[in-house]
Amino acid sequence: MEIQNGMEVATFAGGCFWCTEAVFLQLDGVSKVVSGYIGGSTVNPTYQEIGTGETGHAEAIEITFDPNKISFGELLEIFFATHDPTTLNRQGNDIGTQYRSEIFYHNPFQKQLSEDYMALMATENTFGKPIVTKVSPAVKFYVAEEYHQNYYNQNKTQGYCSYVITPKIDKLKKLYQDKLKK
């Protein structure tokens, strides 16, 4: 999916969107990350509605990126390195269908690359368990409420941020130093 000025869009659900948003905002070549909801049946769902698990939506992020600075493949690698793709409808203590692992592709290239990358990880037994991440076509993405946007950067001292998100950021900085914004 091409948008203005040669930028592309990737959409990932990897558990709590506060965590995934915080990770991808750190990357050079990523110009914008928006937290929201995708993959469900309710029109204009709210955080409270998706929290019931009844709308079918996943907490997800929509990433706008410059493919000349960071590729979709690099985004995939970081996506899989910073969440657990082997737990169905769960990330850590966050449990429910809204916390599933899913890639919402915007074009055939993203679909094929996602499937090929997951097949390679399965062959190499990267995680020691089967990968449960789904690969689905991108559908309507609903932007989450304003207080969810840039959540980690505005709430770093909050307990969840300190104990769950900060270690993910530390791992990102250790493994992908060359991919971070300067």
Image (tube, rainbow, N blue to C red):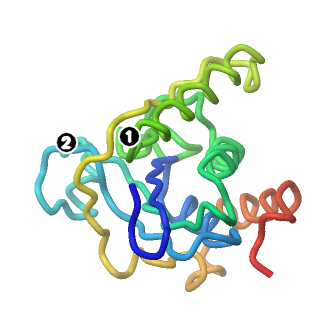
Is the residue 50 above or below the residue 151 in the image?
A: above
In depth, the one of 20 and 136 nearer the eye is 136
| Image position, residue 67 (x, y; %) | 60, 60
Instruction: Say whether residue 92 is left or right of residue 173.
Output: left
Where is residue 23, by image quadrant?
bottom right
Per the image, the residue denoted by label 1 is 96
Is the residue 178 above or below the residue 154 in the image?
A: above
In depth, the one of 120 and 170 nearer the eye is 120
Circle 2 crowding by C-alpha within 10 Å: few under 14, some 14–19, many from 20: some
| Image position, residue 57 (x, y; %) | 27, 47
- Dot 2 falls on a residue whose secondary structure is loop
Q: Would you say residue 64 is visible in this rendering?
A: yes
Circle 1 crowding by C-alpha within 10 Å: few under 14, some 14–19, many from 20: some
In depth, the one of 106 and 166 nearer the eye is 106
Amino acid type, callout 2: Glu
Extreme residue toward the top, this view: 123
Is the residue 55 above or below the residue 70 in the image?
A: above
Picture quarter with the N terminus:
bottom left
Extreme residue toward the left, this view: 43
Look at 40% across and 61% down and name the residue there.
2
Please tell me the numbered disc located at residue 54.
2
Instruction: Say whether residue 167 is left or right of residue 21.
Output: right
Instruction: Say whether residue 182 is left or right of residue 33.
Output: right
Is the residue 131 above or below the residue 19 in the image?
A: above
Q: Compute the Cα span from label 1 to label 2.
A: 10 Å
The earlier-in-sequence mark between 1 and 2 is 2
| Image position, residue 43 (x, y; %) | 11, 56
Look at 43% across and 77% down and name the residue there.
149
Extreme residue toward the bottom, this view: 154
Look at 41% across and 43% down and name the residue there.
105
